[in-house]
Amino acid sequence: MTLLLLLVSEAVVLAAAAMAVKTQLALFRGFDLIVATAVVAAAEISITTVALFPGNHGAALVAGGCAAIVVSVILITSWNFLLTGLLKDHSSPGTFLFVFSLGASTVASGLVGMLRGPGVRQMEPANFLTQSFASLSLGSPLIGVLLGIPLLTLLLWLMRQPRWLAIDLLAQDREFAVELGVKPHQAAIAGGVLTGLAAAFVGWYMAHSSGSTPALGLQLFLLGAGGALLLPGSHLSSAVHGGLLLGGVHVLLQLRIAPTLSMALLFVGILVLVVWRGTSRNAQEVR
Amino acid sequence: MSFWLGAIVSVTLFTVAGLAAGWLEVRLRLLSVAHGALMGTGAYFFALASKSGLATWLAFLLASLGGAAFGMVLVGISRRVVREDFALFSFAVQVAWFGLVANARPWTGGVLGVPGVDELPLVERLNQTQGAFVWALALLLLFGAVLSMERRGSFPVAAAIVARSGELADSLGLSSRWIRLQIGGFYGVMLGAVGAVLGSFLTFIGPEVFAVSVSVVVIAIGFLASWRWWGAMLGAVVLLGLPEALRAAGLASTSTAFFRQLLAGVIVALSAFVIVAKRRR
């Protein structure tokens, strides 16, 4: 039972991370490290908010979640609005986006460190959910499953709505989408909401399970990118499936191997996949 | 005096690392986030080889060759994985390297690292800081001279063709694969050597010494180096020297590290406008 909960919760978290990364990839044709920043911001604000409700676990849970969503959605939506102006007519938006977001996320990490000091920041008391559910191994994964599955369902439903369907169309064929009348800047704002919700959930879960640290935010971003690239296909839903698969593999690996080593091996697997698929014209045999 | 000499050693070493990063960016238009991993590889090779009884000059050579091999593999892969995908790939390499080194306890000491790293060769009569200063200066002069000579030859033209299109390079009779391997090898030698000297200077190495944050600092210095040749020195002084000066003035060590991260992030973010603007022209 515990294993199943862990498996599902990890799969749902990585599916959300993959969706966030893929949405930004679809909107701006590049990997956007602001997802990592939003995850950390959501985690930090969640921890701060929970500390304001000592003893009232229900209110703390709701308030922490709402705060995480608000901060994450505002951050990503504002960032997307900024990017639509900056990336207009850029010949290599992907490179610009990666470099710019790497700089921004490093600034954010530096600020977080200067404001609250080094190390992992955890909920006070440590993982208060365990007190609510009276089982150390069930607390965070159970909440992750109970909240993550409805959230993922909501996000998948949102993606089928016209405004968000435009993002899926942009992911598949940008030029065709623009010809059909999709307005990239409107899609960017809508996509910001989608990415923000997904990142908020990932950050909130991170805060409750292992604590918040910028390094972990970056790792979750990389795993999200792995999930987004794992399965072929340019639909946003392929990222969700990839994330679910990656999360399941991660938990199964941890049955045999230490968590940090299993994470490193997962990255090695992602590296092998990226090299094997290849993105150059040579690798794709484009002539 | 020793404190300021130590700061100068750090500035000099990161100047060399920045020159390597900037050279890779200029020649092949590759943004790598794995600089820390390459430096760390050199450092670990040096530390473990010298501890196992190998002569320190041989251990240093091994560190440079280890860096070269890693660099060749990394840059060689850029034939298949291009542009921002390569940047993401190198980011994953850096994170995977950290995880693997932190878990390979029987060989690398894991998160506890390798203490008591040996002194560098030829400078055993000097103290560790003075010896590291001599070596850092020697590396800067040597690699600076090599890069200066390289710029005057025909290699930059060949590399520019390869960076633009591997197919075009092959059609013109240039081996794009061999050119990438050469660039990767030299880039790796520079970083491996820097890592070895840094490891000896710190007398301790661990995976966190060569984490992603170090890579970002090197990227920031590299961008400045690709803008102007003296930009590497300027970047190293701002990113290494300034926080050390603040530390001497009383700021806590952890705060100076985060301040360095902040500065590096600002430089990298602003560089995005310069680099892409340059490419649009």
Image (tube, helix red, strand yellow):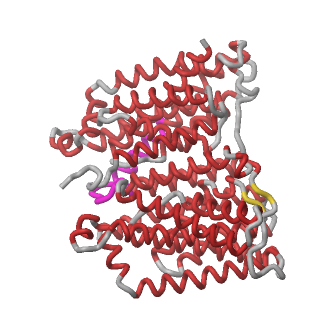
Judged by its main secondary structure, the magenta piece is helix
Residue interval drawn in magenta: A73-95
Instruction: Assess whether residue B234 is covered by the magenta stretch.
Output: no
Please name whichever residue, B218 or A57, is drawn nearer the observer in this view of the structure. Answer: B218
In depth, the one of B67 and B37 nearer the eye is: B67
Residue at 43% over, 47% down: A32
Q: Residue at x 45, y 57 (%)?
A: A99
**Residue B61 at least partly seen:** yes
Residue A63 in the figure: left or right of residue B57: left
Residue name at image x 47 percent, y 37 percent: A224
Q: Whole-percent x and y of residue B176? A: 32, 68
Q: Position of residue B268 (x, y in %)?
A: 50, 62
Q: Is residue A157 above or below residue B43?
A: above
Q: Decide which of A250, A18 is in the foreground and name it.
A: A250
Residue A216, picture quadrant: top right
Percent from the top left, x then y, of residue A43? 60, 35
Is residue B155 toward the left or the right of residue B73 in the image? Answer: left
Which residue is farthest left? A179
